[in-house]
């Protein structure tokens, strides 16, 4: 059991997203892709960008069940840190901390591999940082606007739930292993760890973890707890109700269903298997009908459902 002692309760808990966490978690996913079929379509879309990437300095830490050093994934210092802010934090981790975490990560692992890492912790940290940046550029940065919007939506939804029902009711929904007991958060685990949280606890939704919770208990920054975000339509378009197909046509129906998570035009095009110009035409029709809203940041357009669009989608979906 891992226990986070909060002290002042909900007032010491905050949500944040982390681009660095998404990259590091993707690295682990790439070492075991068959385990998570929900990502297969997305991985196929990005196979050319991922092909030939040298990520060994990062994936060396990704053995199933092994400790993953905390220095790879610094706790976010704000609710929406940039990738570069996360990289700066990673590269600034003190040598002593890197060395101590490498010692823990080496337990039960190939001694020849970790001897080189332990001989020069600064080099190990720097090479891992290079691999993180390489994976960010190849796979995450091109779709980060949609990923960021999905994570923002997750955090907003959870904030609304907490305000209505209280933190104690919401925490178990984040993952079945999590609970809120008095002034503590607990996570079921095969180790016993008690962590005081004098500066609070950060809850980090993640798009690249599906079946677990990742716990950070380092004394060097605010403890963080990463859990699977609920938005999944970045990876594969959901099925659409037949009544919606007849009303809107199959392509526009699939687009509307996918926009349960706000998405970029290029991501939508890949999800529904059309060209970006064709996706733009369908999006314009949905926007003119008042079913979606679109916003633009530079050359990137992001689309999301309006209230009318949500009502239409909910009413067309079969009841369980």
Image (cartoon, grey):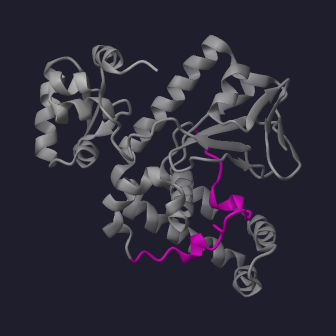
| Outermost residue to the bottom | 112
Image quarter of residue 226: top right
- Please indicate, yes or no, whether residue 295 appears anywhere in the rendered image: no
Instruction: Name the residue at 46% across, 36% down.
Output: 231
Name the spot of residue 261 as percent of width and height, x first: 38, 33
Name the spot of residue 75 as percent of width and height, x first: 65, 48
Please tell me whether residue 56 is drawn above or below residue 283 in the rendered image: below
Image quarter of residue 162: top right
Query: Is 143 inside the magenta-drawn segment?
Result: no
In the rendered structure, the answer to whether residue 276 lies left or right of residue 320 reads left
Please tell me whether residue 144 is drawn above or below residue 308 in the rendered image: below
Name the spot of residue 215 as percent of width and height, x first: 72, 48
In the rendered structure, the answer to whether residue 15 lies left or right of residue 103 reads left
Instruction: Name the residue at 77% across, 64% down.
Output: 97
Name the spot of residue 293 as percent of width and height, x first: 25, 24
Taking depth in this image into account, of 82 and 62 the one nearest to the observer is 62
Instruction: Name the residue at 57% across, 25% down.
Output: 158
Instruction: Name the residue at 69% across, 42% down.
Output: 225
Q: Which residues are magenta?
A: 52-78
- Please indicate, yes or no, whether residue 294 appears anywhere in the rendered image: yes
Taking depth in this image into account, of 313 and 140 the one nearest to the observer is 313
Please tell me whether residue 89 is drawn above or below residue 132 in the rendered image: above
| Outermost residue to the top | 164
């Amino acid at each position: 059991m891992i226990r986070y002692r909060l002290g002042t309760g909900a007032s010491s808990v905050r949500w944040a997203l982390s681009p660095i966490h998404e990259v590091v978690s993707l690295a682990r996913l790439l070492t075991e892709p068959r385990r998570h079929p929900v990502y297969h379509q997305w991985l196929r879309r990005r196979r050319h960008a991922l092909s030939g990437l040298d990520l060994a300095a990062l994936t060396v830490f990704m053995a199933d069940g092994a400790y993953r050093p905390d220095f790879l994934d610094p706790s976010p210092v704000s609710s929406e840190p940039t990738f570069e802010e996360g990289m700066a934090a990673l590269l600034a981790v003190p040598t002593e901390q890197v060395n101590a975490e490498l010692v823990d990560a080496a337990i039960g692992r190939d001694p020849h591999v970790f001897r080189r890492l332990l001989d020069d912790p600064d080099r190990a940290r720097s090479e891992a940082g290079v691999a993180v940046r390489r994976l960010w550029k190849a796979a995450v940065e091109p779709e980060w606007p949609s990923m960021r919007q999905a994570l923002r939506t997750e955090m907003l939804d959870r904030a609304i739930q907490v305000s209505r029902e209280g933190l104690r009711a919401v925490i178990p929904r984040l993952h079945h292993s999590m609970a809120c007991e008095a002034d503590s958060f607990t996570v079921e685990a095969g180790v016993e760890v008690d962590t005081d949280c004098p500066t609070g606890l950060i809850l980090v939704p993640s798009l690249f973890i599906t079946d677990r919770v990742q716990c950070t208990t380092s004394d060097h920054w605010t403890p963080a707890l990463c859990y699977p975000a609920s938005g999944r339509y970045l990876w594969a378009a959901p099925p659409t109700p037949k009544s919606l197909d007849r009303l809107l046509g199959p392509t526009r129906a699939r687009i509307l269903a996918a926009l349960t998570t706000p998405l970029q035009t290029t991501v939508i095009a890949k999800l529904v298997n059309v060209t970006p110009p064709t996706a733009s035409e369908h999006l314009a029709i949905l926007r003119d009908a008042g079913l979606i809203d679109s916003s633009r940041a530079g050359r990137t357009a992001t689309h999301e459902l309006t209230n009318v669009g949500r009502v239409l989608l909910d009413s067309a979906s079969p009841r369980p």
